[in-house]
Amino acid sequence: MDDALRVVVEMNEAVWDRLKNALEDLSEEEIHWRPLPQANSINVIIRHLRIEAQWHLDSLECGEPMPTIAVAASREAIAAVPADFEENLKILEELYIRFVEILRTATLATLQQRTVAAYGEAMGLPYRLSYHQATHLAMHCGQIRTIRNLYRKTRGEPARFFPDSPTYQK
């Protein structure tokens, strides 16, 4: 592994492990529950992550421009992804594992080239492609944990995810 990429590989692996932990022991009702009618469900979030994981993989593997950032997203391709939680989670995991495998064998120069191809004018950091994937997943992991906590609290149960830190009052 290119030492220059070790941190971003480890960051992506750690975020993936946190997401898997956040999804453990989900009930069917939790998958589809929304705190408000207009809010996202966990099912909607996983579908979204699956779609974007494919885009990130295509950008890293082939230098494809990133939809919604560098090019318009195909509405037909998005509509073709069903709202099937189990299937989307399975494919998301396959895509993410493949993304990290490619990242692990990439060089910093290759990652920089693919980032330029993916983001064009919006490039920013030379390793943004790997950073964006990890931060995007981390943000939605927090959203899933919040939804799961709210779901439990509305049923009179304790929050599933509560930080064990002296900086939080109990």
Image (cartoon, rainbow, N blue to C red):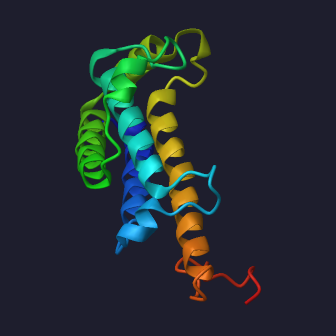
Figure check: 150 above or below 142: below
Figure check: 108 above or below 156: above
Considering the image in quadrants, where does the C terminus appear? bottom right
Residue situated furthest front in the rendering: 37
Residue 22 seen anywhere in this rendered image of the structure: no
Q: Residue 6, percent across and down?
A: 38, 44
To which quarter of the image does residue 164 belong?
Answer: bottom right
Q: Residue 115, percent across and down?
A: 45, 19
Q: Residue 26, percent across and down?
A: 37, 71
Residue 8 seen anywhere in this rendered image of the structure: yes
To which quarter of the image does residue 4 belong?
Answer: top left
The residue sitting at 43% across, 11% down in the picture is: 117
* Relative depth, front residue between 79 and 117: 79
Q: Is residue 105 left or right of residue 19?
A: left
Q: Is residue 129 left or right of residue 20?
A: right
Considering the image in quadrants, where does the N terminus appear? top left
The image shows a total of numbered marks equal to 0
Q: Residue 43, percent across and down?
A: 42, 53
To which quarter of the image does residue 147 belong?
Answer: bottom right
Figure check: 71 above or below 33: above
The residue sitting at 57% across, 50% down in the picture is: 139
The residue sitting at 41% across, 33% down in the picture is: 52
The residue sitting at 25% across, 33% down in the picture is: 102
Q: Is residue 123 left or right of residue 94?
A: right
